[in-house]
Amino acid sequence: MSNRIALTTIVIREVLRFVRIWPQTLMPPVVVTSLYFVIFGNLIGSRIGRMDGFGYNEFIMPGLVMMAVITNAYSNVVSSFYSSKFHRNIEEMLISPMPNYVILLGYVIGGVARGLMVGVLVMIVALFFTDLRVEHPWITVTILLLTAALFSVAGFINAIFAKSFDDISIVPTFVLAPLTYLGGVFYSIDILSPFWRQISFGNPILYMVNGFRYGILGVSDIDILPAMALILFLLLLMSGVALRLLERGTGIRS
């Protein structure tokens, strides 16, 4: 009972944290996505033509949703947990009887909540530019939840190692953004040369984008079962790493 109360408290705090400042947390992805649809979808997409049998706006829509979910799930946890470290209130949770997995789960659920909320808003925006349909609802929801959870855990690990506010922006800027843009959001890897196609298979975000695209449109450059298995494996692996770091007090205990 006490663990459930602790988990609920962390989750409520995390959700209220980004809802209170919704103009900064929820609206920017909506504006950015609208610009992507206008510039890439309408202006450039009309010259590119159809891709994998779909209009360009339809093709890029799943990738834009996934990109928004990844970015917001990650940034929510990394900024929140680092702020707790910076203000030293994380120590109060660590000395309490609350298990470490409850702390991790609370932050991850908060990150997933923001990621899903932004994803829904982006889908609503997409309705103004393309017809939205979901070919495989369960696959769509599963990929979305697993991906949001995975990058929430990744943000948690980044926050553990961060020593300043500048450190929490390094990974999103120099790792996350390039991998996302090269993850098949705006193109099919079938148009790449054999060399670059093989290189693309080493990008884990490619599997997430294509898995979600399969759920929405029913087409994918990647087999769906290996994609889902990879996301689940990475989620379990990084969750284990995050718990281990938390137990050791890495980046927290002096």
Image: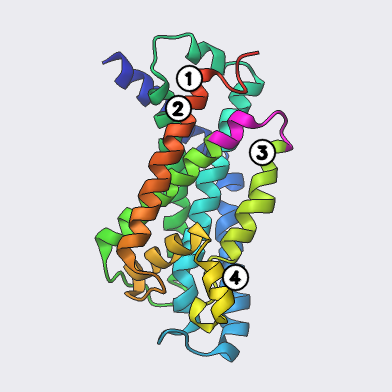
The image's mark for residue 247 is 1
Residue mark closest to the camera, 3 vs 1? 1
- Could you tell me residue 116's position as x and y percent? 42, 50
**Which residue was labeled with disc 2?**
243
Q: Are marks 2 and 1 in contact (CB under 8 Å)?
A: yes
Is label 4 in a helix, a strand or a loop? helix
Where on the picture, by quarter, is residue 215?
Answer: bottom left
Residue 248 seen by the camera: yes
Position of 4 with respect to 92 (left or right) is: left
Residue mark closest to the camera, 2 vs 4? 2
The residue sitting at 34% across, 69% down in the picture is 223
- Could you tell me residue 149's position as x and y percent? 42, 44
Distance of mark 4 from mark 3, alpha carbons? Answer: 25 Å
Chain-order first, disc 4 or disc 1: 4
- Could you tell me residue 199's position as x and y percent? 56, 68
Q: Are marks 4 and 1 in contact (CB under 8 Å)?
A: no
The image's mark for residue 168 is 3
202 falls in the magenta region: no
Residue sitting nearer the eye, 147 or 61: 147
Is label 2 in a helix, a strand or a loop? helix
Residue sitting nearer the eye, 206 or 6: 206
Q: Is residue 85 above or below residue 71?
A: above
Start-end of magenta stretch: 157-166
Chain-order first, disc 2 or disc 3: 3
